[in-house]
Every structure is written in C-alpha cells, then in structure tokens.
Image (spheres, rainbow, N blue to C red):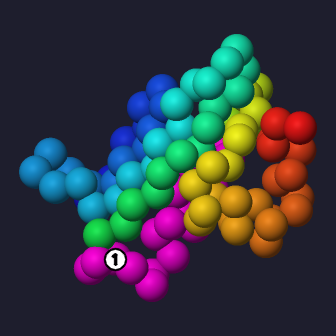
C-alpha cells in the first residue's frame, strides 16, 4: 500500500483498493477546498486521516496554495495545528 498524490487529492491504497482519501478541489486561483476525508473501517483509529492531512499540508506548501476547510475533520485538524493556520484562506 502507498500514498498516491494527485493534483487535487491524495489516496492511500493499491491498484485494487482505495483505503483512504482526501480531496481538495481548486475553488479559485491559488485556493483549494479540503472538502472530504475518507478512511476505511479497517484503518480507522490508526491516525490515517491525520497522515492524509499532513501530506495535504505538504502539497499546499510546495505548490504555494491556500485552503478552505469545509470538511469537518480538516477544520478540527487545523484547530489542533495552529502552526499550519497560515495555509488557511482568510
């Protein structure tokens, strides 16, 4: 299993199964909306959603984009990680 980074999503799984996903479509120039996180039942409670968020933050920093967090998990994650608040669109 591995993480696959796409332009507006990150997926964890292999060719036959997707076990976790975060999506962040572009909503305007330089801004994405982190709108969905999914973790399969077999991986829940193991920190997978947090790993997806950390990878998403890396992608945002690398690409110079900002984010809106409409996904409830993403919004709570940013509250717990104020060091990443600079990535949120004001």
Residue 86, given in percent of the width and then of the height, sits at 89, 44
Residue 59, given in percent of the width and then of the height, sits at 62, 37
Q: Indicate left or right for 20 with 27 as reference.
A: left
Q: Residue at x 58, y 55 (%)?
A: 71
Q: Indicate left or right for 90 with 46 as reference.
A: right
Residue 65, given in percent of the width and then of the height, sits at 73, 28
Q: Residue at x 69, y 66 (%)?
A: 77
Image height check: is 19 above or below 36?
Answer: below
Residue 38, given in percent of the width and then of the height, sits at 39, 60
Please, what is the dominant secondary structure of the magenta stretch?
Answer: helix
* The N terminus: image quadrant: bottom left
Circle 1 is placed at which residue position?
A: 43
Q: Residue at x 70, y 27 (%)?
A: 31
Question: How many numbered discs?
Answer: 1
Q: What secondary structure is found at the residue carrying circle 1?
A: helix
Residue placed furthest toward the left: 16
Residue placed furthest toward the bottom: 45
Classify 10 Å Cα crowding around label 1: few (below 14), some (14-19), many (20 and above). Answer: few
Image height check: is 40 above or below 90?
Answer: below
Segment colored magenta = 41-58
Q: Indicate left or right for 76 with 80 as reference.
A: left
Residue placed furthest toward the top: 29
Whether residue 3 appears in this view of the structure is: no
Instruction: Confirm whether the magenta stretch covers residue 50.
Output: yes
Q: Residue at x 48, y 51 (%)?
A: 36
Instruction: Confirm whether the magenta stretch covers residue 61.
Output: no
* The C terminus: image quadrant: top right
Q: Quadrant of residue 27?
A: top right
Image height check: is 50 above or below 65?
Answer: below
Whether residue 8 appears in this view of the structure is: yes
């Amino acid at each position: 299993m591995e993480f696959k980074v796409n332009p507006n999503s990150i997926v964890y799984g292999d060719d036959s199964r997707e076990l976790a996903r975060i999506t962040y479509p572009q909503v305007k120039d330089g801004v994405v909306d982190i709108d969905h996180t999914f973790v399969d039942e077999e991986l829940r409670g193991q920190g997978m959603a947090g790993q997806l968020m950390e990878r998403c933050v890396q992608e945002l920093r690398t690409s110079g984009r900002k984010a809106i967090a409409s996904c409830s998990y993403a919004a709570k994650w940013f509250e717990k990680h104020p060091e990443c608040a600079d990535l949120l669109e004001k």
